[in-house]
Amino acid sequence: MKPRWADGTELLLITPSEFLERLVALIPAPNPTPHATEGFSQAAHTAQKKTRPWAQLLKRTFKIDVLKCDKCGGRMKIVGVVLDQPTITTPLRALGLPVRAPPIAPARSRQLQGCGNSNDWARADVDYGWPD
């Protein structure tokens, strides 16, 4: 049993609406500003960038440095981006290059044929019902 308050009160009778008011007051605001004491991952979260440059992602994923000049080995700098369709298609046509992207090819068969051992997760001798 909870101890009495200093004035001797043991029980507090409140209406349902008063109860809801007190309960709602305990709910934090949406997306509150996180405090440094909220979890061990807070420091890592704030130190991490939200976005990464596309050149860095390509280098990390495919080991391709798209900003390295093939002729001199120096660093190139992006000075602009062309998004206007006619401005893009005119030089491509003049060079004899395709204007449209190639069609998406169908996926290869998922059935494994003669690779791995019998303990693999999928076997060539079992029909999984996948399309070829």
Image (cartoon, grey):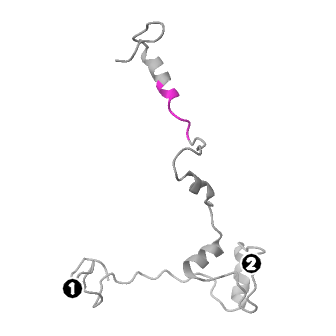
List the residue tagged with mark 1. 125
Residue 8 falls in which quadrant of the image? top left
At 34% from the left and 83% from the top, the residue drawn is 109
> In front here: 46 or 123?
46
* Vertical relation: 62 (above or below) 84: below
Q: Earlier in the sequence, mark 2 or mark 1?
A: 2
Residue 105 percent location from the top left of the image:
46, 83
What type of secondary structure mainly makes up the magenta span?
loop
* Vertical relation: 6 (above or below) 19: above
At 42% from the left and 18% from the top, the residue drawn is 16
The residues tagged by marks 2 and 1 sit, at their Cα atoms, a distance apart of 53 Å
Residue 94 percent location from the top left of the image:
72, 90
Q: Are marks 2 and 1 in contact (CB under 8 Å)?
A: no
The N terminus appears in which quarter of the rendering? top left
Residue 60 percent location from the top left of the image:
58, 76
List the residue tagged with mark 2. 87
Residue 63 percent location from the top left of the image:
58, 82
Q: Amino acid at mark 1?
A: Asp
Q: Amino acid at mark 2?
A: Thr
Q: Is residue 29 magenta?
A: yes
The C terminus appears in which quarter of the rendering? bottom left
> In front here: 43 or 31?
43
Looking at the rendered structure, the secondary structure element under dot 1 is loop
* Vertical relation: 130 (above or below) 46: below
Q: Which residues are magenta?
A: 23-30
> In front here: 39 or 70?
39
Q: Is residue 37 left or right of residue 93?
A: left
Label 1: how many Cα within 10 Å (few below 14, some 14–19, many 20+): few
Q: Is label 2 or label 1 in front? A: 1
Residue extending furthest toward the right: 79
